[in-house]
Each structure stands twice: as C-alpha cells, then as structure tokens.
Amino acid sequence: MKRYQIWFLILLWSMVFIQGFMNLTAKNDYKLMEAFKASESIPIEGKVMVSGSLGEKKLNQKTRRNILKKLAEQAGLTKKYTIDTVKEDNVETMILKKEGEDGGVWFRISSVDNRNYLSTEVAIEDVEEIFGMREKLESIMEENGIETETSLYVHGSFKGILDRDEKDQVEEKLLSILEAKVALEYKDEYRDTIYCYSPLISDYYERDGKRLNIQMIISYDESNEQTQLYLAVPFYNGN
C-alpha cells in the first residue's frame, strides 16, 4: 500500500504543477482527474502564499485593521473571521483569519519600526483550486498597488518511513516528469531538500548563480510516524 500511495502522489503532484503553469492536452487533463479520484484516501493540502511591502510609514491599529478588512472583503470574506494582534520581540503582527475543516485564510500585517509587510496565506484541501486562488490574491494585491512575491506548494503524507532507495526513486520520478535538473540538494537520514530548475515554469530566482524554481522536500515526522512530501514553486517557507 505504501508504494501504491507514493506513485499516485507523484502523478497527482506533477500533473497539478504542470497544469498550473502550462496548457495541458485533453489527455493529460484526463490523467489529472483520474489521479485525483484514485488518491482520495491520501491527505493532500495545497497552499498559496502572497507577500509584499506596505512601505515605510507608521500604521496605527485602526489603519492596519481597515487594510486587513478591505483585503478580506475583496477576497470574499465578509464575516466569521477574527482579528488578533501578536507581539514578539520588536515585531507587532495583526492577523485576520478564518479557519475551517477544509482549509483556512490568513491576512497578516507585520510592523517592524516603521516598516510594514503584508502576507496572505490560503490553505485548501482541494488542490485543483490552488492556482485560481493564486491568481485571485495576486489580482487583489495589484489592485491595491502592492508588489508581491508568490509561493505555492502541495503537501501529502502517509504512514511509515522511506528508505534511501525509495526516496531516490520518488525524487527521480518527479524530476523526470517535471523535466527538472537538480541545482542544490541537502540530504540526511530524516530529510531530503532539493532545489531544482524546470524550463516548464517560466518564473525563477537565482542563488549562487544557479536558476531555481522548484523545491522538493521529503521528511520524516518521527512523533507521528509519517513521511511528509512537499513540492513547492519556487520554494517552501513553512516550518
């Protein structure tokens, strides 16, 4: 069962990412839907993260609250959300959030001295929707004159640990499907982190003179006895 789940995860993630950045043929679109149907028993989450600067100016509590409420309204959130403020060291963060069983939405304004940063996260169990949500959030930011950076990923998990051969097989299969080449990699007993570049995705950033636009992570959660797999564009900035 473990190997069966792994290969459906690979197919699912690869087709989702290709669909998000390319025009698929009808045949590949059919494959995508079949992969979703076949992997219903595997917990999958997609998340899009959009962030940008609000400039260097002092924003009081009322102003930050109004900005968050306006953005939430533009995103379709009009009620049943909460707004809280958290202070840690010299960073004050106001958070508007709405969470549910199938995902959540978080808008944050973090202020350091007079510098203000906005970040938005949307987590969705239906990963088919993640690219549409990305476009929606970027459009909202653009309407408000905010230059943004965007990151998105899909995540799945299953019981048990992979040995080195199994991890290598998963990574090689994903790299092959995404036509990606490894630029940087860090591997140990419990975590593989791979940065790579795929010409299928037009956006990229550079590190140490190398083009990067995909990050792959395979890690083992010892406390829950689960293997976690992440596939991110361009990088994963979770915990």
Image (tube, helix red, strand yellow):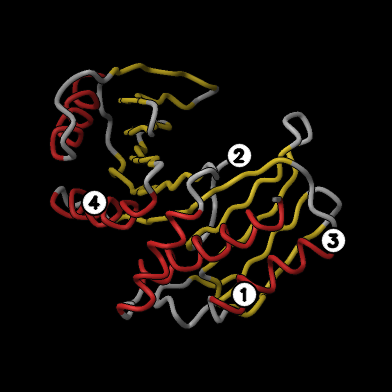
Q: CA distance from mark 4 to mark 3?
A: 44 Å
The spot of residue 65 in percent (x, y) is: 22, 23
Please tell me which residue is depicted at 30% across the width and 54% down the height of the picture.
134
Q: Which residue is mark 3?
A: 164
Q: Amino acid at mark 4?
A: Ile
Tell me the crowding category of disc 1: few under 14, some 14 to 19, or many 20 or more residues within 10 angstroms, Cα based.
Answer: some
Q: Amino acid at mark 2?
A: Asn
Q: CA distance from mark 1 to mark 3?
A: 16 Å
Q: Which mark is residue 184?
A: none
Identify which residue, 94 or 89, lies in the foreground: 94
Image quarter where the C terminus lies is top right
Q: Amino acid at mark 3?
A: Arg
Q: Which residue is mark 1?
A: 175
Q: Earlier in the sequence, mark 1 or mark 3?
A: 3
Helix or strand or loop: what does disc 3 sit on?
helix
Label 1 close to label 3 by CB (< 8 Å): no
Question: Which is closer to the viewer, label 1 or label 2?
Answer: 1
Question: Which is closer to the viewer, label 3 or label 2?
Answer: 3
